[in-house]
Image (cartoon, rainbow, N blue to C red):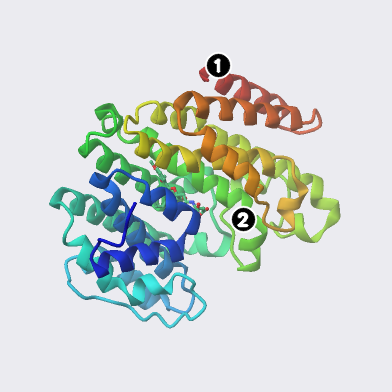
Amino acid sequence: HDLTKESPELQRCYYLLTKTSRSFAAVIEELHPELRDAIMIFYLVLRALDTIEDDMSIKSEIKVPLLRTFDEKLNTKDWTFDGNGPNEKDRLVLVEFDKILSIYHGLKPQYQDVVKDITYKMGNGMADYILDENFNLNGVETVKDYDLYCHYVAGLVGEGLTKLTVMAGFSDDSLAQDNFEKSNSMGLFLQKTNIIRDYHEDLLDGRSFWPKEIWSKYTKELPLFHKDASFEQAGLSCINELVLNALSHAKDCLSYLSMVKDPSTFSFCAIPQVMAIATLAEVYNNRKVLHGVVKIRKGTTCKLILESRTFPGVVAIFRRYIQVINHKSSVSDPNYLKIGIKCGEIEQFC
Ligand SMILES: COc1cccc([C@H]2O[C@H](CC(=O)N[C@@H](CC(=O)O)C(=O)O)C(=O)N(CC(C)(C)C)c3ccc(Cl)cc32)c1OC
């Protein structure tokens, strides 16, 4: 849409958006005017929160209270933060947070309330995890912990977006009546896909989000998958079980998408989901995941965006990649039968 007629602050916010996520910024800019600015601001506020959580140069005595009270910054007119982490690529959203605030205060009050409510819940969820020693030392312990962590950082985003789209009349009211189960799955499907894909990168940062309840079936130490060639097969079985776990959200995601009515909102919701199912098919049984970040090809991304403009198009994409996963699975894999059953279930649903 044409930004030149917008206020300087709004133009600056869209500039910040393109800086933080080039490809996804284009999708947000195509949104219906009723929700475009609200979702752009929601995205930037979440990015600011994520940048604080990720900034290892802020010590936890400062970081924890900052995360817990971040929603209160939304009541101010000009709060900014010059977090001293020069290497944080998203630092700009904190340094220029006053620009985000000026647009936030111009949003409809009911949209402001959704952004603030989710910011409050996410900030406190993040703070709880930073304080939870066992998370810090061993990473995420149980699959239950894994689902809770992903709820805080991603499931809540789905919940907020559902509230916004239902308020705008762009999605079925029923999406806001299932205790946000389907909204939560929309976030967990994306976040779990990223966590599987980012194994090596997170290891380099000295952390991991792979749940110990799963990886400890295949190794005593998580880095061995990368370091020791004799653990490569075990690493593949672990990836495959994590993909199986992520696929448990696929039906909810397809059901969610079937209830989004507005075309631009549908694309906004569908594009990340089709990227995720394609990524899951790429990482499944793929040893490259243990040594680097595996990305789907640019050409594939373009095809997926074009094909995901309608619900039947999205269903066809899911069906195709479920088949790819099924054909890649090997009889020697401990979860061979389960992945076959799961793929069958999702195909039935398609
Ligand atoms: C109903 O729920 C959704 C509907 C549409 C999109 C998203 C979801 O999609 C992007 C898509 C995105 O940001 N893609 C990036 C690639 C990447 O960062 O991995 C991109 O294309 O650059 C994404 O990844 N996250 C981040 C979380 C997953 C943590 C929520 C995200 C962050 C803020 C917002 Cl407002 C939205 C999203 C939804 O959230 C679940």
Within 10 angstroms of label 1, few (less than 14), some, or many (20 or more) residues? few
Q: Is residue 190 left or right of residue 334?
A: left
x and y, in percent, of residue 77 in the image: 17, 72
Would you call the spot at circle 2 few (<14 residues within 10 Å), some (14-19), or many (20 or more)? Answer: many
* Position of residue 134 measured from the top left corner of the image (x, y, whole percent): 51, 60
Residue 276, numbered circle: none
Left or right of 27: which side holds 138?
right
Label 2 beta carbon within 8 A of ligand 1: no
Residue at 39% across, 60% down:
126
Q: Is residue 5 visible?
A: yes
Task: Determine whether 262 is above or below 287 in the image.
Answer: above
Q: Is residue 207 above or below residue 199?
A: below
Q: Are marks 2 and 1 in contact (CB under 8 Å)?
A: no
- In the displayed structure, 87 sits above or below 316; it is below
SS class, disc 1: helix
Say if 61 sits above or below 291 in the image. Answer: below
Q: Looking at the image, is mark 2 or mark 1 earlier in the sequence?
A: 2
Whole-percent x, y for residue 227 in the image? 79, 61
Label 2 element class: loop
Tell whether 326 sits left or right of 89: right
Number of marks in the image? 2
Residue 172, image quadrant: top left
Write the residue at 35% across / 70% down: 64
Task: From the image, tell me which residue sits under label 2.
Answer: 198
Q: Quadrant of residue 176?
A: top left
- Taking depth in this image into account, of 165 and 138 the one nearest to the observer is 165
Front residue (pair 311, 349): 311
The three-letter amino acid code for the residue at tag 1 is Gln
Residue assigned mark 1? 348
- Which amino acid lies under the numbered mark 2 shown in the image of this protein? Asp
The answer to whether any part of residue 69 appears in the image is: no
Give the spatial CA distance, label 2 vs label 1. Answer: 30 Å
